[in-house]
Image (tube, rainbow, N blue to C red):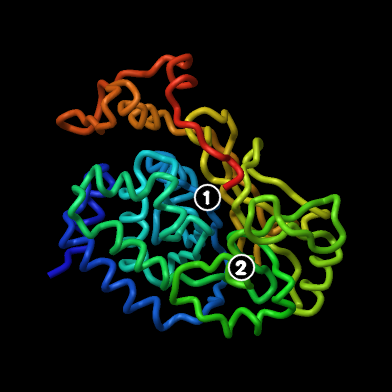
Amino acid sequence: MLDLDQCLEKLYQGQLLSEPVIEQLCFKLKELLIKDSNIVHISSPITLVGDIHGQFYDLLEIFKIGGYPPDTNYLFLGDYVDRGYHSVETISLLIVLKLKYPSRVTLIRGNHESRQITTNYGFYTECATKYGQESKVWKLFTDLFDFLVLAAVVDDTLFCVHGGLSPNVQTIDSILVIDRFREIPHDGPMADLVWSDPDIELLNFRISSRGAGYQFGVNVVNRFLQLNGFERIYRAHQLCNEGYQVFWKGKVNTVWSAPNYCYRCGNKASILEIFDRLSSDPKGFRFNVFDASPDSEKEFIQLENGDGEFSYGEDGGEGWPAVPENRLMKKAPYVEYFM
């Protein structure tokens, strides 16, 4: 019998779940997600979270700042894995929270929820390191990713997606007919939703320098908002030094939730708190900006050991050695930030 409370207790302490438990969790969540449309409709109040990228202790910091589920409703905008040292713990915790509080937690798909990308950017290696080369854990997770929804609409007026818009998507009806239960393709509307970016210098579409998706301008945004009766677009996908970025007077907004990205960028992060429609706040939302969790130094133990292994204290608590900044700069892995 699957005990979600026990799973939560272990995960909040940073402990790994066993492979049989992960298999059960993924099966249960697929049963739940298969019932969802490609776009889910949710109501405020809700807190939006951008890219996390395996920075588990910063995810816990988000809950400390914004409130733990189910007291706070959360919409996660994708890119849960890769780059950070604790992608397994991060995605495991989000799966358990979704199963325990299905109406309070929403997970949409990012471009890193993909077999091809996770093979190259860390998640595959992390699964093999933590569970063994013969384990099925990476396959269990990546098969689950095929079931994640592609977008969400808050209060019928706010369109939320990981990446951005597509020349193949004029209205959200075009999203509803996509076959999402598969690997993210190299091109087409499904790829564009998770890969595209706004560009303030553009009016229309241009092929993206990322190698997938498009860059899109203000004319594209205005047309999409008008045709669908939306007020704003919220998305993640792009590193923001201040934790968020506002385009075209708030018509498009980027939320970035991985502080000190890749353990060396020095950026801030944010969550976006959208208040109840009856709220007295004139804006109706706020970007809650935060810095990296002090506990993130625990993730640098891998660098300190120099052997690629994760080392934990007996109680998972105090006594974590800090890594000198100059060592971090030298040993933090090279990454292509634009991916």
Up-down relation of residue 224 to residue 302 (above or below) = below
Badge 1 density bin: few <14, some 14–19, many ≥20, Cα 10 Å: many
- In the structure shown, which secondary structural element does the residue marked by tag 1 occupy? loop
Residue 113: where, in percent of width, then height?
45, 59
Disc on the earlier residue, 1 or 2 = 1
Q: Between tags 1 and 2, which lies in front?
A: 2
The residue lying at 77 percent from left, 56 percent from top is 250
- In the image, residue 266 above or below residue 80: above
The residue carrying mark 1 is 51
Which quadrant of the structure image shows residue 153?
bottom right
| Tag of residue 187 | 2
Q: Residues within 10 Å of mark 2 (few under 14, many from 20)?
A: few
Kind of residue indicated by mark 2: Asp
- 158 on left or right of 48: right
Residue type of the residue flagged with mark 1: Asp
Q: Position of residue 256 (x, y in %)?
A: 59, 46
Question: In the displayed structure, does residue 309 sit left or right of residue 175?
Answer: left
